Image (cartoon, rainbow, N blue to C red):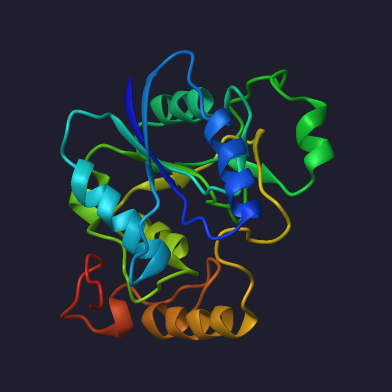
Amino acid sequence: MKIRGLLPALITNKEQQEMTDKCRKSLVSFENCLELEEDNKPYKTKVAGVWNAFLDKWRGKEYDYLLITANDTQADPMAIDWMVKCAENNPNAGMITGKVTRDIEEFKKNFGQREWTDELTRGLLDPACFLLRKGVIEKVGRLDEYFPCEFIERDLIYRLKLAGYDVIQPDIVLWYHPPYSGTIGNDQQRLMKALRKYRIKWGGDANRESYRFPFNDMSLSYTHCRK
């Protein structure tokens, strides 16, 4: 399989540089063709902006999957290959997320020695790093820059479900993510603002969304994104 990957990394300090270096070194594939690019440019809509720039560039091209990572994560050597394997075993899955641990010692303990399982994670997923199957963005539409930082993934996940796709995760710890965000920080005021906006758009959150149309407006489809 051919995979095009994005490592978005707006580096403003030494800590972010170190995290990005560790992430970059960890992104490998033994069974697939992985082509990785790094984007260090600042975007007005931050995370959503850099992701959209990548997806606009590569959707519809020759790649079977598009991979987006967070630059504060680290991947197990089998992470990408096993996410692809999970996707191939579940052809209705439009998005495959990687299971993370926030405990670096737990991550190191079985590094590169975890065993494959067909079991999928139940409940809420942590989409710090994810694969998108070819054709998904063409059907679902761009990421909604109404959410510049938080809730971008959750909005995309709900829209994928409305489009008829499954969103799944192999139930194997494949990524490390620190207990805090090393990329965008942990601004509680900004987070709560994003949560309010998400609830206005979808009538709830965390698998309790109640609207099938954005803002409960039946003239809008799940592809609708605010400018």
* Looking at the image, residue 161 lies above or below residue 66: below
In terms of image quadrants, where is residue 144?
bottom left
Viewer can see residue 155: no
The one nearer the camera, 139 or 183, is: 183
- What residue do we see at 56% from left, 29% from top? 25
The one nearer the camera, 133 or 27, is: 27
Q: Position of residue 27 (x, y in %)?
A: 52, 30
- What residue do we see at 45% from left, 13% from top? 31
- What residue do we see at 79% from left, 45% from top? 103
In terms of image quadrants, where is residue 119?
top right
Q: Position of residue 171 (x, y in %)?
A: 64, 36
Relative to 51, 150 lies left or right:
right
- What residue do we see at 25% from left, 72% from top? 225
Q: Position of residue 90 (x, y in %)?
A: 42, 31
Locate the N terminus and report the quarter of the image it occupies: top left
Q: Position of residue 46 (x, y in %)?
A: 40, 67
The one nearer the camera, 120 or 145, is: 145
